[in-house]
Every structure is written in structure tokens, then in C-alpha cells.
Image (spheres, grey):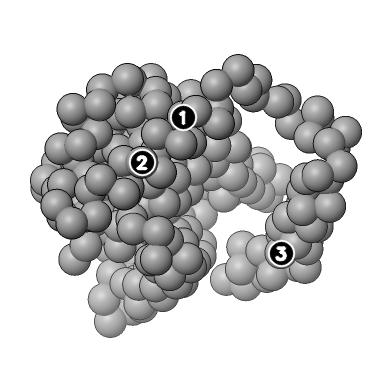
């Protein structure tokens, strides 16, 4: 499986598993744990609060992941950030897998938060990495591949959540732990890929490293032309100051493009489908 496919599937493989798992099993686990600790059944309101926290904290983790993804991609590199990001996935898988055996729903909450960070960083850095390592002629196709493999990840998680696979009550901790599978695959495959040539040349000033990466990615024939494109981009960026998000609205050249992106993404999130996905097992 190509590295980019693994990385694109990973964030919403987690989401697909979360949506297809049987919420009643997790809620029963919370109730049993509460009863063992306090010798009393948990109230309906407390159960709803804990369950809502487990579900929604994934989004908070995603917000944090997106917020730090850009900074990490500059400090660690695109490849380095994606490799480091697997730490969150593996730790989350371990915590969620152990939550039932150690009778701790707190581990579920922490694990969900960590896997949210993993998803946020992945969705931020992975398209950037793909765009910078791919030939110009294929960047559009690879860019659209992100959405395709997000859907594949959701479908894979829902299939694994079926009763015939890992959807039974005794298996839900293992179901949540399968988030480690894409992380392990990426740790095995991604090290064989070079770092982003653009990052090496523009951010690190490593021209030789950039040439080596371009030869590995594009071959000798297209290496020189790709290097020229990166050199031109670096020249265009000379003296350029990165704008703050709110400053973009004052720039007429990008204002309408920015508004279009915002409206489309808001419509995607506000159409109600997430509410259905999160509550249809209730």
C-alpha cells in the first residue's frame, strides 16, 4: 500500500470505527466501572456527560492537531512530522485498548483526545507533503486522492465494526486499538520516502539534499526542471511576509477564494450529517 494511501486512510479510519462501534457497549462499560468504584449506578446525566465527552473530545484533539501541524512541519519537516505523529496514534491505541481491562474510562477520553491530535496533524501535513513530492502533472489527482481515501477509511472502520468482525461487546477495546494499524504501516513504509524537496531547499537551505530527493522522486530527466521551479518559488518568496489569517480578508486578490473555502467547509459541517452519525446508535 503506498504511503500516501496509508496516511490518508488513517485519520478517518479512526472516525469510521468510532461511528460504527456500538455505543451501548461502551456505556455499559462506563456504568460497570462507576459501580465498582462507588458501589452505585451512575446517573443518566453523568453517563450522558461522560459519553458526550468521549465522543466530542476527538474534535478538540483535532483542533489542537491542526493548530500545531503547520509549526511542526517546519521544525521537523513534512516527513519527520508524519513519522512523529504516529506516536499519538500508537499511544491512543494502547490507552483505548487497555481501558476495559484496567477499568478506566478516563483512558478512553485521553485516547480519543490523542487520536484527534493525530488526525488533525495528519490532515494538515499529509496534503502538503503529497503536493510537494509529486510531479506537477499529478498534483491534482493526488490532491483529490485525500478525499477518496478518507472515505475508504470510514468504510473500513464501519466494516470492522460489524458483529461478524469486531463489533461484539467483548471485542470493542480491540476495535478501538486497530487505529495502530495505519500507524505501524506508515512507520514501516514512510522511512523509505525522501523528505520534501521544497522543504529541504526553501526551509532548510539544503540544495544537495533537495537534488537527491528530486532524483529519487522524479528521476534524472525531470530533476533539473523541478529544481528550477523550486528556485523560482524561493526567489518569489524573498522579502515576503506571511500574513495572519485575519489579514487575508483585507486582500482583495484572495478574499473571494477564502470566503468560498470557508462557506463550503462550514456547509459540510453544518448540514447535520455529523449529528446523525454520532447519535444513530443511541
Q: Is residue 250 visible?
A: yes
Q: Tell me which corner region of the image, top left, top right, bottom left or bottom right, holds residue 2.
A: bottom left
Residue 80 pos. (x, y %)? 27, 31
Tell me if label 1 and label 3 are in contact, CB under 8 Å.
no
- In whole angstroms, how far apart are the C-alphas of marks 2 and 1? 10 Å
Q: Which residue is mark 1?
A: 234
Q: Residues within 10 Å of mark 3 (few under 14, many from 20)?
A: few
**Can the viewer see residue 150 in this picture?**
no
Q: Secondary structure at mark 1?
A: helix
Name which residue lies at 66% across and 43% down.
49
Q: Which residue is mark 2?
A: 228
- What whole-number distance in Å separates the C-alpha atoms at marks 3 and 2? 38 Å
Quarter of the image where one finds residue 161: bottom left
- Along the horizontal axis of the image, is 28 left or right of 99? right
Local packing at callout 1 (Cα closer than 10 Å; few below 14, some 14-19, many 20+) is some
Residue at 19 percent across and 29 percent down: it is 209
Q: Quadrant of the N terminus?
A: bottom left
Do callouts 3 and 2 mark residues in contact (Cβ within 8 Å)?
no
Q: Secondary structure at mark 2?
A: helix
Tell whether 259 sits left or right of 124: right
Asked whether, in this view, residue 219 is left or right of residue 250, the answer is left
**Residue found at x 77% / y 53%:** 257
Helix, strand or loop for disc 3 = helix
Please state which of the two labelled residues, at mark 1 or mark 3, is closer to the viewer: 1
Q: Position of residue 191 (x, y in %)?
A: 14, 41
Q: 93 or 171, which is in the foreground?
A: 93
Amino acid at each position: 500500500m503506498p504511503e500516501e494511501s496509508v496516511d490518508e486512510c488513517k485519520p478517518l479510519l479512526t472516525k469510521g470505527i468510532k461511528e460504527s462501534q456500538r455505543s451501548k457497549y461502551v456505556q455499559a462499560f462506563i456504568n460497570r466501572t462507576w459501580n465498582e468504584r462507588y458501589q452505585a449506578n451512575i446517573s443518566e446525566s453523568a453517563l450522558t456527560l461522560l459519553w458526550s465527552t468521549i465522543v466530542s473530545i476527538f474534535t478538540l484533539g483535532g483542533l489542537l492537531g491542526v493548530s500545531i501541524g503547520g509549526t511542526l512541519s517546519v521544525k521537523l519537516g513534512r516527513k519527520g512530522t508524519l513519522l512523529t505523529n504516529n506516536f499519538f496514534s500508537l499511544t491512543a491505541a494502547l490507552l483505548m485498548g487497555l481501558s476495559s481491562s484496567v477499568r478506566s474510562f478516563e483512558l478512553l477520553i485521553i485516547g480519543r483526545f490523542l487520536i484527534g491530535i493525530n488526525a488533525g496533524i495528519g490532515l494538515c501535513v499529509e496534503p502538503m507533503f503529497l503536493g510537494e513530492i509529486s510531479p506537477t502533472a499529478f498534483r491534482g489527482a493526488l490532491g483529490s486522492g485525500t478525499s477518496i481515501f478518507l472515505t475508504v477509511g470510514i468504510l473500513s472502520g464501519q466494516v470492522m465494526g460489524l458483529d461478524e468482525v469486531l463489533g461484539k461487546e467483548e471485542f470493542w477495546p480491540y476495535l478501538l486499538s486497530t487505529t495502530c494499524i495505519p500507524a505501524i504501516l506508515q512507520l514501516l513504509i514512510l522511512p523509505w520516502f525522501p523528505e520534501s524537496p521544497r522543504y529541504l531547499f526553501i526551509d532548510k537551505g539544503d540544495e544537495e539534499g533537495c537534488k537527491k530527493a528530486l532524483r529519487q522522486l522524479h528521476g534524472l530527466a525531470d530533476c533539473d526542471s523541478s529544481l528550477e521551479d523550486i528556485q523560482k518559488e524561493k526567489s518569489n518568496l524573498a522579502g515576503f511576509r506571511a500574513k495572519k489569517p485575519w489579514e487575508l480578508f483585507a486582500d482583495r486578490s484572495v478574499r473571494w477564494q477564502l470566503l468560498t473555502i470557508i462557506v463550503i467547509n462550514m456547509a459540510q459541517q453544518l448540514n447535520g450529517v455529523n449529528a446523525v452519525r454520532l447519535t444513530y446508535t443511541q
